[in-house]
């Protein structure tokens, strides 16, 4: 849970402002852990085979199964990485206004109506974001100059620091 909370707090995967995610970090983590598991399973199998006795056949079978599952896991992770890479190519095609229709690179350009609708949606999202930013800056400015009451303290008595409005000094636009 700590790892999930940390990754989410640092916006390492999900970017909530843009509504996008960076799955290459997840697939990299999958690749690393799958390889580490495979290395461990192979070492375990090798050790079991070297020291096997009549009584340790069950342990040898389990070690072999873990090694085979680790191989399958690595193949699956490779397929996931390839699928994500193909999907990233599709997304890059969309940025260039191109619909890929298969894995060989065939496709067609966006229809004009779809292009206009996407541009309108992007402009609307940008207007909404600028409006939210302007409202947040207004609240922080009023709080800083004592024109409005400061935010209420949380019930757990966590302290709140007032933001210094650097945008009024020309540091941000």
Image (cartoon, rainbow, N blue to C red):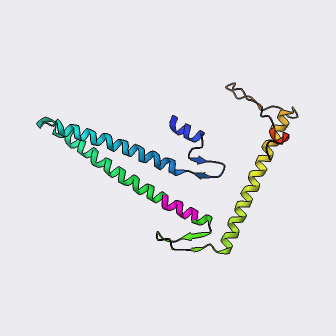
89 within the magenta span: yes
Residue that appears at 85% across and 39% down: 169
In the figure, residue 128 lies in which quadrant?
Answer: bottom right
Helix, strand or loop: magenta stretch:
helix
- Is residue 117 placed above or below 30 in the rendered structure? below
Residue 68 horizontal/vertical position (percent): 27, 49
- Looking at the image, how many numbered discs can be counted on the residues? 0
Q: Which residue is nearer to you in this view: 170 or 65?
A: 170
Residue 94 horizontal/vertical position (percent): 60, 65
- Is residue 68 placed above or below 120 in the rendered structure? above
Seen in the image, is 145 located left or right of residue 98?
A: right
Seen in the image, is 23 located left or right of residue 127?
A: left
- Is residue 124 placed above or below 22 in the rendered structure? below
Residue 167 horizontal/vertical position (percent): 81, 42
Residue that appears at 76% across and 48% down: 132
Q: Which residue is nearer to you in this view: 159 or 64?
A: 64
Q: Which residue is nearer to you in this view: 103 or 139?
A: 103
Residue that appears at 35% across and 42% down: 37
In the figure, residue 122 lies in which quadrant?
Answer: bottom right
Residue that appears at 51% across and 74% down: 106
Q: Which residues are magenta?
A: 85-92
In the figure, residue 51 lies in which quadrant?
Answer: top left
Seen in the image, is 109 located left or right of residue 128?
A: left
């Amino acid at each position: 849970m700590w790892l999930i909370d940390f990754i989410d707090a640092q916006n390492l995967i999900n970017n909530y402002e843009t509504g996008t995610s960076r799955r290459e970090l997840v697939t990299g983590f999958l690749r690393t852990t799958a390889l580490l598991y495979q290395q461990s399973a192979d070492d375990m199998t090798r050790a079991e085979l070297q020291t096997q006795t009549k009584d340790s056949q069950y342990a040898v079978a389990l070690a072999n199964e873990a090694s085979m599952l680790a191989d399958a896991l690595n193949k699956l992770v490779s397929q996931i990485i390839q699928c994500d890479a193909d999907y990233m190519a599709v997304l890059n095609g969309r940025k260039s206004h191109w619909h890929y229709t298969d894995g060989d690179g065939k496709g067609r350009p966006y229809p004009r109506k779809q292009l206009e609708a996407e541009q309108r949606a992007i402009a609307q999202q940008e207007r909404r974001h600028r409006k939210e930013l302007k409202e947040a800056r207004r609240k922080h400015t009023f709080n800083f100059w004592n024109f409005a009451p400061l935010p209420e303290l949380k019930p757990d008595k966590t302290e709140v620091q007032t933001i210094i409005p650097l945008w009024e000094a020309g540091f941000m636009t």
